């Protein structure tokens, strides 16, 4: 099978390298920007790839919705299998692209879009065939895990942890997608669509790590707790729940042993029980290895079923106790079970409430200029 | 695809149940012992299954080498795909059965034979296609993990932990295969063959948990260490290393969060980095879910390559420091870095030595009637 690669950045170079030795595969063309065709295998025209009858499959690793969507659509219409690591693309256009793949009788696979080297979506799609997936999620963003781990184990403050993550290439110059939880949310969108045939496109609850401080982390350490940014999904009647929020784990929880920029993805199958995957969620070769894995799975079990549909997430029935830090003047907004005051700041644990209520209450406080940090207490 | 099931015990009933709802599959016949054909779908003649042209695949979940080997050979020769959860069969006869499968152009898959629901061998076989697997292994026996965890967290002694494991159905009436490390060793044999194309059949180092006492576990707890039975494999020149032994982990290691009868399998790929899988390693539906996963992977990537061959394991280059407890009279056999004496018993950490030397030294002491417990110190 001959493979073309769209994009020659971090992941693209990794895929091209790995393809060289991959039994059963041949390297085709690489799509680069106009003016960057400095080697014979590089082209800047997607038509050249679509018109090359010898190319059977396309690995899209450009990132972003456009022009990736246009190019992937062209490839599918030209009868080429598509494998992608692009979560923004699949979250925004996955259903449409899957229809195109079905119409053209080719595979459309994207396990590299969630968890990097961690073979989460691949195995989830197999498990979903004949098991009832009761819940799924985990630590799906390596950048924020690196920052939280650095704050806890090295005593760094937020700015320092972010700056080091940027220096190491774990965080982008604009880190918003990671620290806001948007990246993790896109991954849970894909996982819900794979497991439940329902792609949530609205109704999310999303809290990143932007409000956490070194003082919070010190408090957690003193209580024997570890903070992780966790993504959760599961069925909720006709819809799904899908949310991202910081969670506090007590010592001994597997999440506490997920260090640095690692990911931990899991699902709970009615038959299989809990299945947990831990590995590197990003990076050239980890992500490339997931792209190659998908290439080997072409023609096998599809990730999206033909019946996959959009839903609005419903987080009203997911309920936890929360740890909250807020101003004394906002204390009355919460039903604290226990709390302590430190000057004008109050922190403590509030009685179990729904994810949707907690996130809405926090938004209301911020909308009126207040400050709040909250994290779910591990169930 | 129509599937026959060989064996109707714990796992067989689970597979039969799951097949009922599995899209794309139909239930065929079940092979039971003569006299047990108390339902129309049960037969006691393997010929009946082989001669039924409507049956495309066979799931063998009887356990043991014979008659499973005879039956699986018959099925493959009759052109039926075979999926098995039987590690003893694949460890003893896997190469021969794989040849038969190749000759008859059918699949021979066995991911349920290692790790139960944990999708280890399936993903390892995909990773091995285009990655260099630098090491593999983990906690591959749920019975001993349950016992070690019970001893540590509940303060049970060995006999009590074993008795409860038997009551819960985690340990057999004769627990030797589990507590001696034989079961875990069979799994690492399969993993080495999948990853390296080399099935180790001799030269192993195998130490189970039979020598551990409640006092040892108390000592480990006092030192902040947790004991797990760990299986390790990797390439060693033309051969592989493959061994099972207790290992002591310090707090925070992911192994410490593997509780009860769970398994934790992992490999380190040059490209992917470390990939860890945690889940239930046994039980009706966890194991059945792995059998079903393999059924969905029929026609895909094979687990054994045609070139898989037998080798003698070489554990002389795998080196760790060890914790040793022995009689004062045997102390001179080891190069202790630090030790303490308690009456006639000495325990402490010995300088790094090879796995093969440590296991041979322990055997020599036991051969002359002495007692010893040893465990590797986590690297």
Image (spheres, coloured by chain):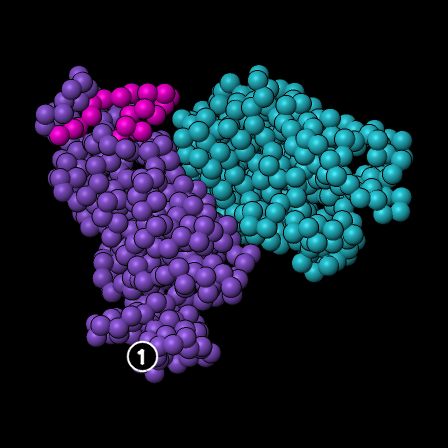
Chain colours: A cyan, B purple
Residue extending furthest bottom?
A: B332
Q: In the visual, does B71 lie left or right of B121?
A: left
Magenta segment includes A66? no
Q: Residue at image x 50%, y 48%?
A: A289
Vertical relation: B310 (above or below) B25: below
Q: Is residue A120 left or right of residue A157?
A: left
- x then y, percent, for residue B230: 39, 57
| Residue located beneath label 1 in the image | B330
In this rendered view, identify the residue nearer to me: A164 or A25. Answer: A164
Q: Position of residue B351 (x, y in %)?
A: 43, 77
Q: Secondary structure beneath disc 1? A: helix
Q: Residue at x 40, y 45 (%)?
A: B261
Q: Quadrant of residue A184?
A: top right
Residue in view at x 37 percent, y 43 percent: B281
User: B40 and B177: which one is in front?
Assistant: B177
Quadrant where the N terminus of chain B sits is: top left
* Frontmost residue, A203 versus A121: A203
Name the subunit of mark 1. B
Give the camera-side residue of B38 and A309. Answer: B38
**Residue B333 location, quadrant:** bottom left
Residue bounds of the magenta highlight? B12-33
Place of residue B299 in the rendered image (x, y in percent of width and height, measured from the top left): 32, 34
Q: Is residue A303 visible?
A: yes
Could you tell whether A199 is left or right of B256 in the image?
right
């Amino acid at each position: 099978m001959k493979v073309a690669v769209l994009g020659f950045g971090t992941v693209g170079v990794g895929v091209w390298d790995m393809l060289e030795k991959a039994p059963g595969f041949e390297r085709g063309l690489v799509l680069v920007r106009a003016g960057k065709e400095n080697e014979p295998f590089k082209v800047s025209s997607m038509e050249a790839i679509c018109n090359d009858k010898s190319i059977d499959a396309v690995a899209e690793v450009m990132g972003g919705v456009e022009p990736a969507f246009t190019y992937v659509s062209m490839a599918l219409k030209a009868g080429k299998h598509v494998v992608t690591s692009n979560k923004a693309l699949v979250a925004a256009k996955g259903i449409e692209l899957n229809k195109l793949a079905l119409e053209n009788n080719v595979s459309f696979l994207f396990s590299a879009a969630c968890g990097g080297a961690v073979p989460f979506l691949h195995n989830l799609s197999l498990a979903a065939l004949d098991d009832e997936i009761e819940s799924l999620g985990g630590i799906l963003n390596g950048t924020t895990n690196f920052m939280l781990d650095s704050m806890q184990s090295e005593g760094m403050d937020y700015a320092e942890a972010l700056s080091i993550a940027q220096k190491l290439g774990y965080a982008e110059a604009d880190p918003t997608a990671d620290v806001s939880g948007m990246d993790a949310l896109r991954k849970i969108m894909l996982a819900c669509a794979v497991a439940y045939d329902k792609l949530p496109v609205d109704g999310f609850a999303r809290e990143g790590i932007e409000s956490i401080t070194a003082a919070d982390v010190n408090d957690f350490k003193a209580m024997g707790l570890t903070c992780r940014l966790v993504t959760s999904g599961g069925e909720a009647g006709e819809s799904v729940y899908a949310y991202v929020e910081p969670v506090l784990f007590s010592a001994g929880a597997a999440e506490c042993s997920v260090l640095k920029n690692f990911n931990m993805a899991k699902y709970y199958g009615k038959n299989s029980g809990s299945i947990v995957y831990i590995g590197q969620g990003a990076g050239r070769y980890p992500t490339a290895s997931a792209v190659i894995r998908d290439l080997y799975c072409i023609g096998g079990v599809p990730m999206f079923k033909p019946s996959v549909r959009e839903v609005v997430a419903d987080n009203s029935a997911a309920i936890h106790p929360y740890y909250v830090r807020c101003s004394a003047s906002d204390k009355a907004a919460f039903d604290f079970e226990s709390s302590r005051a430190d000057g004008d700041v109050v922190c403590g644990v509030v009685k179990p409430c729904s994810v949707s209520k907690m996130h809405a209450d926090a938004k209301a406080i911020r909308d009126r200029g207040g400050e709040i940090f909250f994290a779910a207490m591990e169930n």
